[in-house]
Amino acid sequence: MDKNVAIIGASGAIGNAFLEHYSNDQSVKNVYAFSRKKQTYENQKIQSFELDIENQNSVEDAAEKIKDKSLNHIIVATGILHSERFSPEKSIKDINYQTMEKVIRVNTIGPALIGRYFIPLLSKDNKSVIVFLSARVGSISDNKLGGWYSYRASKTALNQIIKNFSIELRRTNPKAIVLGLQPGTVDSK
């Protein structure tokens, strides 16, 4: 089978690991790599595209570029915990509007938009899979330490979106599988 795979967030540590895996898989014909900036790859299977997860038009335009392809796997490997400008909140007094807005845009709204525009590209003839990277700290019942307000809230909301996608796809694309994966702590920038 000649599979088509899309990886959103292909330039990040986890996205790049998926990119390497799929580009070496003999059953995969095309790997569509999406990241903020177009990348150059030596492997001819890989086609690179720009996608800004914080911009709805960018997400829609990116999906439009491969709309004629039937996707077997979509990996959404995007996310943010902190940046050079902010750290995870350790206390109520650390909550900041701009930080919370940024984290929720990247961790929740962006993946929801990916679902809106990329889920219709999933194969309806064969089993297909869309995977969203989430986090265990998004679990309400597993929260024993508190803190990380923006990140926890954004991943909890993402988990609900993943659940909603799975319910809708049961009706609209019964061969599709929707997954939320918790990769654990990753040593990356």
Image: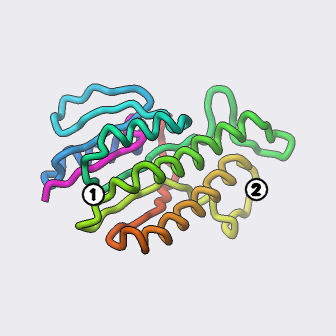
| Residue type, numbered disc 1 | Asn
| Residue at x 35% of width, y 67% of height | 176
Give the residue number, with chain letter if any, for mark 2.
146
Q: How many marks?
A: 2
Residue stretch in magenta: 1-12
Place residue 171 in its image quadrant: bottom left
| Residue at x 34% of width, y 32% of height | 49
Relative to 45, 107 lies left or right = right
Question: Residue 72: which disc?
Answer: 1
| Residue at x 50% of width, y 64% of height | 165
Q: Is residue 187 above or below residue 174?
A: above
Few, some or many C-alpha atoms within 10 Å of disc 2 (few <14, some 14-19, many ≥20)? Answer: few
Q: 52 or 141: nearer the eye? A: 52
In x, y percent, where is residue 12? 42, 37
In x, y percent, where is residue 95? 80, 41
Relative to 76, 83 lies left or right = right
Relative to 99, 165 lies left or right = left
- Residue 8 lies in the magenta-colored region: yes
Instruction: Give the spatial CA distance, label 1 vs label 2.
Output: 38 Å
**Residue pushed farthest right?**
93
Q: Secondary structure at mark 2?
A: loop
Q: Is residue 159 above or below residue 59?
A: below
Few, some or many C-alpha atoms within 10 Å of disc 1 (few <14, some 14-19, many ≥20)? Answer: many
